[in-house]
Amino acid sequence: MAPISITVDSRWIVIGATALGAAALLYQARSKKLATVWWVRKHKRYVHAATKPSDLIVIADFDATITSGDSEQCHDLLGASKLMSKAFRDDFAPLLDWTTNVAIDGVEWWDTAHGFMVKHGMPPRQLIPRLVREAHMEPRPGALELLKKLEVMDVPVLIVSAGVTDVIEEFLRQHGALSENVTICSNRLNYEADSAPKSVSPSPPITSFTKPLAYKSASSFFAQHSSRRALIVLGDSVTDVDACENVPHDRVLSVGFVNSRPDAAAHAQAFDAVVQGSKGSLDPVTEIVEEISPPTFVRRSISKLGLSTSVGAPSSAPAMNKGAHPQPKKN
Ligand SMILES: [Mg+2]
């Protein structure tokens, strides 16, 4: 039997490859659309051009920053879960009514919420994994990739949150992101030897309004990493940028997540860059971190040439204007 020969016109190969390339670009563009980043202060894009991995600390909020903007937040899921006792939920409900709660703007909210947890013994310690698993709480797109990258680079991450440490730890654990480089500065339920919480620490609590206290509250973390003077700060509330307020540093880049807020003006004032949308991606932050830690083959080539290991900055990138970082506007 004569062999079958198939002839393919090389033009079709070129057309096919072009179509595949176009499809890949379209897919990439579609992904990037979810990660729309708005550079409020364009020169800050390259503020970490000279930063080495050994210089860097990342300070991040948790609720609606590491998690997506439409996720349940720590106190919401504890206060409203059907897994909690009815008496606890009844007491807690007025705290979650954002339209009528007059104490919302103060530390009193956290004190009241934590008081109800201790009074009702909620949540039972053994229920926390199920509470987190069944909650509508998901990582922001790109969050797990960023955390993995920081773990591989051995960059310390401080999560400063007005939420609940036990919930944050469990969430990170369930997503394989509770690595050794991560420290959580939030409100911890103290169970002692019981299954019901006996107290919540610290006192006063970590709230959205007391983030400048992070330097003091996480003093051992900052003492351990005192030689690191380059910061990336991430948050969705304008007060989240306050977490770096008292931290000694040479360079800082802040990124704010607007989520579904209709007006980004306050974020534009508080942060160097803002990311739009409840599912706005953390990929732009990972890109910056990757520039601090270029791939091995780039590092090898650079070191062979005897150049600096920092890449990604154009020679015209202006140096950071010290003191230019605006004070956040409280809202
Ligand atoms: Mg938040």
Image: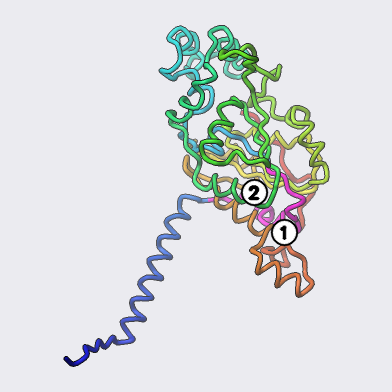
Q: Residue 128's spot in the image, x, y percent?
A: 51, 24
Q: Is mark 1 within 8 Å of ligand 1?
A: no
Q: Residue 251's spot in the image, x, y percent?
A: 76, 49
Crowding at mark 2 (Cα within 10 Å: few <14, some 14-19, many 20+): many
Circle on res. 156: none
Q: Nearer the viewer, residue 265 or 103?
A: 103
Q: Quadrant of ligand 1?
A: top right
Q: Amino acid at mark 1?
A: Ala
Q: Residue at x 73, y 67 (%)?
A: 315
Please say if 181 is above or below 1. Answer: above
Circle on res. 49: 1
Q: Residue at x 55, y 49 (%)?
A: 145
- Dot 2 lies on which element? helix
Q: How many numbered callouts?
A: 2
Q: Residue 254's spot in the image, x, y percent?
A: 66, 44
Q: Residue at x 73, y 53 (%)?
A: 53
Crowding at mark 1 (Cα within 10 Å: few <14, some 14-19, many 20+): many
Left or right of residue 5, residue 156 in this image: right
Q: Residue 28's spot in the image, x, y percent?
A: 45, 60
Of callouts 1 and 2, the N-terminal one: 1
* On-image quarter of the C terminus: top right
Where does the magenta region start and end?
37-58
Circle on res. 150: 2
